[in-house]
Amino acid sequence: QGHLVESGGGLVQPGGSLRLACAASGFTLDYYDIGWFRQAPGKEREPLSCTSFRDSSTSYADSVKGRFTISRDNAKNTGYLQMNSLKPEDTAVYYCAADPNYRVVAGGNKVDYWGQGTQVTVSS
């Protein structure tokens, strides 16, 4: 049975940076699209970014475009989300997901794999 495990969350001051990692075990990410999501208390889950294994294309939500960068390292079987210029409104639990279907991973519904989440808190 495969798993995704996120890491890299924590407390950071406004304007700071964090890099989240999404490590896969039990399966290879080579043939999976990767997506990142977040959910703040009392709010719905928000899709942030996804990347295709077929052509490395990427997409971003307007709320993070220009500040966040999605990437992957297939040799390490890991996806990443580099987050710069963080704002207090970025505070949330961040999740990664993997699915062979780009539309599925972009929407976050019925994906093959979800991580357990990592807390990101942006506060001075």
Image (tube, helix red, strand yellow):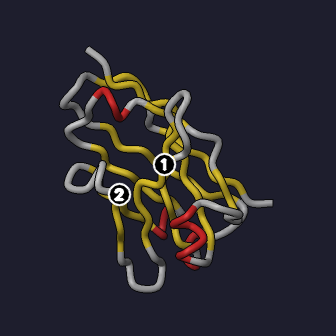
Horizontal and vertical percent position of residue 15: 18, 31
Which residue carries the number 1 mark? 46
What amino acid does circle 1 point to? Glu
Q: In terms of depth relative to the viewer, which is nearer, 66 or 27?
A: 66
- Please tell me the numbered disc located at residue 99: none
| Mark pair 2, 1: CA separation | 9 Å
- Location of the N terminus by quadrant is bottom right
Which residue carries the number 2 mark? 61
Asked if disc 2 and disc 1 are in contact, CB closer than 8 Å, the reply is yes
Q: Residue at x 53, y 72 (%)?
A: 33
Q: Residue at x 32, y 49 (%)?
A: 82
Q: Is residue 36 above or below residue 93?
A: below
Q: Secondary structure at mark 2?
A: loop
What amino acid does circle 2 point to? Ala
Q: Residues within 10 Å of mark 2 (few under 14, many from 20)?
A: some
Q: Is residue 117 above or below residue 60?
A: above
- Occupied quadrant, residue 70: bottom left
Horizontal and vertical percent position of residue 85: 20, 38
Left or right: residue 34 versus residue 116 is left
Q: In terms of depth relative to the viewer, which is nearer, 64 or 29?
A: 64
Q: Residue at x 42, y 44 (%)?
A: 20
Horizontal and vertical percent position of residue 72: 42, 64
**Hey, which residue is sitting farthest bottom in the picture?**
54
Left or right: residue 85 versus residue 89 is left
- Occupied quadrant, residue 107: bottom right
Q: Secondary structure at mark 1?
A: strand
